[in-house]
Image (cartoon, helix red, strand yellow):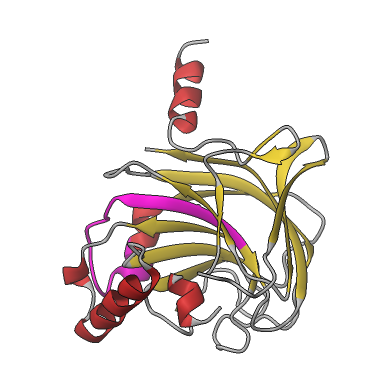
Amino acid sequence: MTRGRVYALVGAGLAASAAWAAVLAPLVEGDAVAPPWRFAGLPQQTLPRTDYRAAAVDGRAALRIEARGSYGNLVHDLPAGSRIATLAWQWRLERQNPLADLATKAGDDSAVKVCLLFDAPLAQVPFVERQLLRVARAASGEALPAATLCYVWAHAQPAGAVLANAYSRRVRYVVLRGADAPLHAWLDERRDVAADFRRAFGDEANEVPPVAAVAVAGDADNTGGHSVAYVAALRAQP
């Protein structure tokens, strides 16, 4: 993923369920990706598009993500000022990309990641990166986020690693699963968004900005590799 691709996630029980459901729509409905989830790629993209489709796995309605030398994200825009306190989901890796290495530009691919795009103020961005972001926004015609936090199932990095994208520090990774995590098995995640934001972007800000969008993605455009993963039951609590 180049810099442009980085720029270019009865009673109390019912109330809790409603709170989870209020923020994000389901990833899939029936045999299709559910609106308002939408594919977001590069302007005039010539690369193959990462394939997103509905699938049933072990009785679960899931989003299947297949990257084959490809790029593209599935994005869910949120109303201005949206807050997410907790993000939870299930994911499963069927085929890892052994060429992926998030610490390098040549290996900056991932089989699956869940990202939060924050509406962070430009004032908190270091000067040089601020100018680059302004240029990227002008070129793309989009309000590209000043801070994106991605939870990643990595190959070269161990669980617990936190690192910046090799092309842009506007994107930072928190590795939740590494190469030692089991394949072909569902794993559950539940994250404290504020704690993770401060962990990843604490050098720039302590206050957690609103979330502009959530994205789910897999890519293999830098390595030319091939990966397959699933995500299910993605939900957010304000």
User: Could you tell me residue 166's position as x and y percent?
Assistant: 48, 84
Residue 213 colored magenta? yes
Task: Name above or below for residue 46 compared with residue 89.
Answer: below
Q: Is residue 19 left or right of residue 218?
A: left
Task: Name above or below for residue 63 compared with residue 154.
Answer: above
Q: Is residue 40 left or right of residue 116?
A: right
User: Could you tell me residue 117's position as x and y percent?
Assistant: 40, 58
**Along the line of sight, the residue nearer the viewer: 143 or 224:** 143
Residue in view at x 50 percent, y 17 percent? 14
Name which quarter of the figure residue 146 lies in.
Answer: bottom left
How many marks overall? Answer: 0
Name which quarter of the figure residue 49 lies in.
Answer: bottom right
Pick the quarter of the image with the N terminus.
Answer: bottom right
Pick the quarter of the image with the C terminus.
Answer: top left
**Along the line of sight, the residue nearer the viewer: 175 or 110:** 110
Residue in view at x 56 percent, y 38 percent? 35
Q: Is residue 93 left or right of residue 139?
A: right
**Where does the magenta region start and end?**
198-217
